[in-house]
Image (cartoon, rainbow, N blue to C red):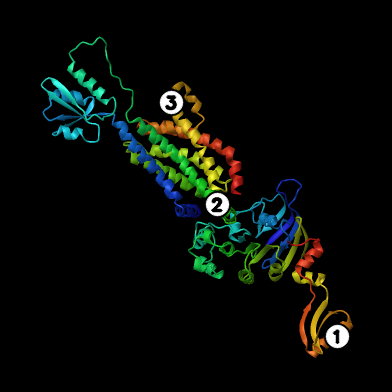
Amino acid sequence: MRRILNFVIRDIKSGTRDWLVIYLAAAPIMFALVLKMLIPSVGDSTLNVAIYEDTPPAIVSYLETYAKVIEVNDMEERILRMDDVFGVVVNDDKVEIVTQGNEMEGTVDLLKTIVGRYQNESVELPIEVEFSDIGWVMSPMKLEGANLLIIFNTILGGMLILLNLVEEKMSNTISAINVTPTKRKEFIIGKGLLGFILTLYGGAAVITVLGFEGINYAMLFVSVFAISFIGAIIGFSIGVVSDEPISAIASMKTVFIPVLASIFGAIYLPAKWIFILYWSPFYWAYDVIKDILLVQATWGQVFMNSGIILIITALVFVGLRKRIVNGLS
Amino acid sequence: MIKVNGLYHSYSKDENFAVKNVNFEISKGEVFGFLGPSGAGKSTTQGVLTGLLPIQKGEVEVVGYDIRHPKREMFNKIGVSFEQSNVYGKLTALENLEFYRKLFDVETMNSMDLLKWVGLDHVANKKAGEFSKGMKHRLTFIRSMLNNPELWFLDEPTTGLDPAIASQIKDIVKEKNKQGTTVFLTTHNMYVADELCHRVAFIIDGEIKLIDSPRNLKLQHGEKFVVVEHLENDVLKKEQLSLIIDQDKARLNEIISTGKIEMMHTKEATLEEIFIKVTGRGLE
């Protein structure tokens, strides 16, 4: 344990000297903040309606089923602010919509439809209209974006392992470590630990910044921990044979292809074609993390998906083992 | 300390051996020099002895451990200084030593004391990446002493160093040897080998051609002559006199008794001359 910690501390020292660890630690927070800035713009498609205090309760109640309703004293001042807020003013039986003129395209038509439906409630329609729920319980951008970032973090963790190993290869220090009592597993754990910590920390940062509530952190920890192995193994396999950081990073970037293919495949492929993603540990990670974020995951699902991830990772390890062992010699 | 019997090693794992049928033993407290030109098999032999290269054929015992079944604790007893400096450039000299110090299970030397030994204490907190080649070499050298090794492998310890620093390094090796450290010295520098080693092995094309002490080699292969430069009637004369022929011995006594000797030295062979004579090849 002493030696493992020694490697971790060395890597932190070395990584902070050229800001590497700082950049990689800041990356998940930065990505999450960018995503958070984008999420409100999706939320802006929600109708915001300003009304006077004396608006009849019936229309207020009706509007509240479709829009966020706020009471104001100065309608003009509220409408003229930067955000998209419409005014609804009731004069006798007439309902007027007040707009600034620069609101998001289509939203005024939506409000007109809603207000028109209220005014024409008694009119018999020649068609029957039904409202249905498509199942979204949170912004898809928030859900999918957070999931993508959490899985993306595993590659960042692998990249940290890779760059620390490249440093060892560049300075030929592995030979020097090989003539100390350090056991190979101590070296591997010591070199890999920081990557795992970064991945877990990144996941926690994404969840915190994006404000997910009520999720089971233990389930998330188990799932992220399982998927971290694949990033670590790929980081090791590239790192131990590279003595130049740019080419090593270029090799690592190719891993983004299966990551993105798995996630976008899971989002866009019809259910009957999902089986073509079963080879990818990133798909299984996406699948379980999505349910964890939606607070729908069960421990059975977490263990099953994590088990599949670890089996696929073990197969990848078997394929890369010789390359890793030779590189560490 | 080291027993090597029938050691072979091939990088291509075929009959193209980098070292073949190497046999030698090194006793405790000995400084043993492995002398040979580049590519002779010196580093390959050291690589096998330190466990950095796998043993393919032969028997090797190092500090009591069979190298076929090496145990990690063996490395608490040995120190290895590499020919090419290999230190962490982003860490300071002191951090480099402190990091390695914590990898051993035995009592280690004080890092600052070691830095003082080789005159690096004033740059203890400077990043090793900003060091000159010689400074990095000294750092690599003292790192190999951290665990107070019983057996110390030194690969070209003075190569590329200026004479003053090289002399400092040689003094440290002598001092550690006096304290009981066994040294396996790999070099192509005959002067270093001559000065430090109790015995040397000449290796060429992967084979040991000869093992003996530098003194014995000089006695065996050197010429028994003395060259004397002396003044006779204010004229400088140079004479080469045999130490075997009675007439020459008498002449030498005569010159010594006149007391006008300017220079006198024996015509003993250098290790390089002996190496060339034995192997038919130079050391470069």
Query: Crowding near pointer 3: few (<14 within 10 Å), some, many (20+)?
Result: few
**Quarter occupied by residue B266:** bottom right
Tag 1: amino acid: Arg
Nearer-the-camera pick, A243 or B79: A243
Q: Quadrant of residue B223?
A: bottom right
Residue drawn at (75%, 59%) of the image: B203
Q: Please name the amino acid that badge 2 sits on.
A: Glu
Q: Position of B38 compared to A167: left or right? A: right
Residue corresponding to mark 2: A168
Is disc 2 surrounded by few (<14), some (14 to 19) or many (20+) residues within 10 Å?
many
> Which residue matches tag 1?
B251
- x and y, in percent, of residue A251 in the image: 54, 40
Chain designation of label 3:
A
Q: CA distance from mark 2 to mark 1?
A: 66 Å
Label 1 to label 3, Cα distance in Å?
106 Å
Q: Which residue is mark 3?
A: A268
Badge 2 marks a residue whose secondary structure is helix
Tag 1 and tag 3 share a subunit: no
